């Protein structure tokens, strides 16, 4: 069975029970903040809008993937 995007959405409270997470607001450059977050994580998941034309990754996601000390999963949005 394949779920549509709307069917795959998990309510926020259920998600917190499955995998606790936190929201952090940073007031610095995105690459710097994400690379720092990756140093404290096993896996960093970032989005890419693909605004770079023929390039597969966005400029921020590409720089994070190259500089991060942990694994990085880039999800195309």
Image: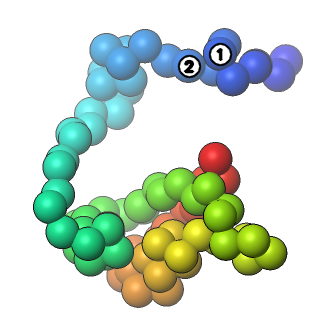
Residue at 14% across / 61% down in the picture?
27
Q: Residue 65 versus residue 29: which sits nearer the camera?
A: 29
Whether residue 71 sits left or right of residue 30 in the image: it is right
Secondary structure beneath dot 1 equals: loop
Q: Position of residue 50 (x, y in %)?
A: 67, 62
Q: Is residue 25 above or below residue 44?
A: above
Quadrant in the picture for residue 68: bottom left
Q: Position of residue 11 (x, y in %)?
A: 43, 13
Residue 28's tag is: none
- Looking at this rendering, what residue extends furthest in the bottom direction? 67
Residue at 36% across / 82% down in the picture?
69
Q: Residue 37 versus residue 57: which sits nearer the camera?
A: 57
Residue at 74% across / 76% down in the picture?
55
Q: Which residue is mark 2?
A: 9
Q: Is residue 16 above or below residue 53?
A: above
Quadrant in the picture for residue 53: bottom right
Q: Position of residue 71 (x, y in %)?
A: 47, 71
How would you rate the neighbour count of disc 2 (Cα within 10 Å): few for under 14, some for 14-19, many for 20 or more? Answer: few
Whether residue 6 sits left or right of residue 63 in the image: it is right
Q: Which residue is mark 1?
A: 6
Circles 2 and 1, Cβ within 8 Å, touching? The answer is yes
Whether residue 3 sits left or right of residue 71 in the image: it is right
Secondary structure beneath dot 2 equals: loop
Quadrant (top left, top right, bottom left, bottom right) of the N terminus: top right
Q: Is residue 9 visible?
A: yes
Whether residue 67 sits left or right of residue 7 in the image: it is left
């Amino acid at each position: 069975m394949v779920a549509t995007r709307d069917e795959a959405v998990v309510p926020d409270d259920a998600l917190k029970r499955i995998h606790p997470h936190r929201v952090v607001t940073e007031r610095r450059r995105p690459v710097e903040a994400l690379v720092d977050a990756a140093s404290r994580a096993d896996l960093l998941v970032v989005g890419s809008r693909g605004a770079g034309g023929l390039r597969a990754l966005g400029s921020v996601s590409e720089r994070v993937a190259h500089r991060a000390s942990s694994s990085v999963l880039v999800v195309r949005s």
